[in-house]
């Protein structure tokens, strides 16, 4: 998700939707990988019929949802997300935006000023379980449902719902008539069943950011004015059926945890085939300035390069198409698709596309709980998209993630940092959230390469994708994957960097002839890369293993004795007189005070 951070300079980007007129029907389902958490993977099948009135921006829907309880628990209640209810005066999103110290400038106090015909809402008119009428209550953006009969382990139940809804004026991600004139940006627009897993229900209210969903299959029929061009998650089934002034379009979307669509009368629709990959769709308004129209044309070949980079460096993209759609309020990822604003310089357009496309892997295929572990999708996405963008440069940067390091170190020194275990809605400052989720999250994975070695990190990312795609991985799954690749002990890394605000600060305390003394000033332990220049002008690299890691990364440096964390200093002797010493010459360790790294 794209956020603009004034305090800690950051940016994030997008994800997209599929076409109805050049789609592939009935693609093969992505394969399922077995893992230890497979028994907790709930499943939903949605079938929805939607009738959109483009004059009032209201729509009617009926939804049949088949829910499979794959957990070992008996389920006594269920919850649905009603995200559009956030766009009403007095909602939690409205109040939070008006009371936080650094509100998102796109929201501000705009929700509080919405008129009745401008607000968003989803009103559930009826709901049944296997034909039995249910009692339910709408509480803000959550529908609380009391079941007529508990759902047993392994049981399937069918919920049928009728609902009315209104598309809000575009404010945050979703809405009508955005700043660039896109008619409908339909994200988080339907009653969406909340996730249940080994940690219980995840029925978080929609306050500021981040989503979580149940894997399933979608069958969506949309009736809309026939002159609207529509892009949406999934694959078209046959041609649109025209009746009078309207048409009905049917999409099937296998193995996704969300469904998004956008529509406008003035969309241009281009396609670009990725070699040995998916069909790319691009939807953008024909009334864009000439420079922006050219940018959208130029974007297509580069997006294909990005798609290949991610498939080669994480895992193969499993669907037959992906769409980049002008819409929304910045950049935001969705299943098989992204919505991005289109009036950008080419560098910005490509950058936001790289970021949101990367979200296809982190978070739409590796579907971590964004509300609890926002850094796993935003941070890992920022890391891999920085590498992808660097691969497109004529002169690649030595450290593609240097911006993330600066952002994290700025946060660590700001006095406003909260641990990465903080719920996405519970950060005191939006800027601190952004620097934590994007910058520190990116440094978490980049610095892991410093700890275990870059080749091992590459293997870890691929193994992580292979083992946890189409699941809901958690932070320890990343660390355990790295441990399986390396046979190191790495829980300390997750504990200190991911669960505390402990910082890394190592320094050169003294150099005296052949004797070097280093000191640990920060609380977080790390192995140490060291470069020594001797008085004769020669250089030598040393590697000091961290004792609690129980192993050494692959290195050409001279490996010397372990450093146990509790010892604040470390002394060793060289064979020749020392002229100078430098800790971490690569800059890949997130040391918050680099001034004491040299002597």
Image (tube, rainbow, N blue to C red):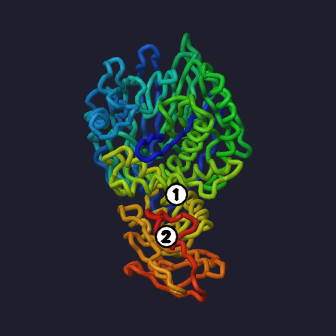
* Label 2 crowd (10 A; few <14 / some 14-19 / many >=20): many
Is 216 left or right of 30, judged from the image as shown? left
**Residue under pointer 2:** 597
- The image position of residue 550, as x and y in percent, is 49, 80
Is 146 left or right of 8, judged from the image as shown? left
Name the one closer to the observer, 476 or 517: 517
| Above or below, 345 relative to 367 | above
Total marks placed: 2
Is 122 left or right of 438, judged from the image as shown? left
Structural distance between the alpha carbons of marks 2 and 1 = 38 Å
Name the one closer to the observer, 138 or 442: 442
Mark whose residue sits in front, 2 or 1: 2
- The image position of residue 105, as x and y in percent, is 39, 33
| Above or below, 264 relative to 460 | above
Identify the mark at residue 50; answer none if there is no mark: none
**Residue under pointer 1:** 468
- Residue 26 appears anywhere in the view: yes
* Label 1 crowd (10 A; few <14 / some 14-19 / many >=20): many
The residue furthest top is: 244
- The image position of residue 494, as x and y in percent, is 42, 65
* Circle 2/circle 1 CB separation < 8 Å: no
Q: Secondary structure at mark 2?
A: loop
Q: Earlier in the sequence, mark 2 or mark 1?
A: 1
- The image position of residue 57, as x and y in percent, is 43, 19
Q: Secondary structure at mark 1?
A: helix
Is 455 left or right of 106, judged from the image as shown? right
């Amino acid at each position: 998700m794209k956020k603009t951070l004034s305090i800690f300079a950051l940016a994030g980007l997008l994800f997209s939707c599929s076409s109805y007129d050049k789609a592939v029907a009935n693609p093969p389902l992505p394969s399922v990988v077995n893992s230890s958490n497979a028994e907790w993977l709930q499943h939903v099948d949605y079938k929805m019929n939607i009738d959109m009135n483009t004059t009032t921006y209201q729509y009617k829907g009926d939804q049949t949802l088949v829910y499979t309880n794959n957990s070992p628990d008996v389920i006594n209640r269920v919850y649905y997300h009603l995200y559009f209810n956030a766009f009403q005066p007095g909602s939690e999103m409205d109040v939070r935006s008006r009371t936080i110290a650094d509100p998102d400038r796109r929201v501000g106090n705009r929700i509080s000023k919405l008129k009745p015909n401008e607000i968003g809402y989803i009103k559930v008119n009826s709901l049944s379980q296997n034909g039995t009428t249910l009692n339910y209550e709408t509480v803000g953006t959550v529908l609380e449902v009391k079941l007529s009969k508990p759902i047993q382990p392994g049981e399937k139940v069918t919920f049928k719902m009728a609902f009315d809804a209104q598309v809000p004026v575009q404010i945050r991600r979703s809405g009508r008539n955005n700043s660039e004139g896109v008619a409908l940006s339909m994200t988080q627009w339907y009653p969406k069943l909340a996730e249940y897993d080994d940690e219980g229900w995840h029925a978080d209210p929609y306050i500021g950011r981040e989503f979580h969903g149940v894997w399933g299959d979608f069958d969506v029929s949309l009736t809309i004015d026939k002159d609207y061009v529509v892009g949406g998650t999934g694959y078209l089934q046959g041609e649109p059926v025209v009746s009078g002034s309207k048409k009905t379009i049917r999409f099937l979307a296998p193995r996704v945890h969300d469904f998004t669509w956008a529509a406008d009368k003035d969309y241009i629709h281009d396609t670009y085939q990725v070699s040995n990959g998916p069909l790319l769709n691009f939807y953008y308004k024909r009334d864009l300035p000439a420079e922006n129209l050219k940018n959208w044309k130029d974007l297509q070949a580069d997006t294909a390069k990005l798609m290949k980079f991610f498939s080669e460096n994480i895992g193969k993209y499993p669907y037959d198409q992906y769409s980049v759609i002008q819409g929304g309020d910045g950049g935001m990822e969705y299943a098989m698709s992204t919505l991005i604003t289109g009036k950008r310089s080419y560098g910005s357009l490509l950058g936001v596309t790289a970021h949101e496309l990367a979200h296809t892997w982190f978070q739409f295929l590796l579907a971590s709980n964004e509300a609890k572990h926002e850094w796993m999708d935003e941070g890992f996405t920022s890391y891999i998209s920085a590498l992808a963008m660097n691969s497109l440069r004529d002169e690649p940067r030595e450290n593609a993630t240097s911006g993330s390091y600066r952002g994290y170190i700025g946060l660590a020194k700001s006095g406003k940092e909260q641990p990465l275990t903080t719920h996405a809605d519970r950060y005191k400052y939006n800027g601190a959230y952004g620097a934590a989720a994007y910058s520190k999250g990116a440094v978490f994975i980049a610095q892991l390469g410093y700890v275990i070695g870059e080749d091992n990190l590459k293997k870890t990312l691929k193994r992580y994708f292979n083992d946890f795609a189409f699941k809901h991985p958690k932070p320890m799954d990343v660390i355990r994957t790295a441990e399986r690749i390396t046979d190191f002990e790495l829980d300390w890394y997750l504990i200190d960097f991911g669960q505390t605000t402990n910082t890394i600060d190592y320094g050169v305390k003294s150099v005296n002839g052949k004797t070097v003394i280093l000191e640990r000033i920060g609380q977080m332990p790390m192995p140490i890369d060291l470069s020594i220049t001797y008085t004769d002008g020669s250089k030598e690299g040393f590697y000091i293993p961290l004792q609690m890691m129980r192993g050494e990364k692959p290195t050409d440096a001279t490996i010397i004795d372990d450093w146990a964390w509790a010892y604040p200093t470390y002394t060793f002797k060289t064979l020749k007189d020392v002229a100078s010493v430098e800790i971490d010459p690569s800059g890949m360790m997130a040391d918050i005070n680099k001034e004491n790294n040299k002597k």
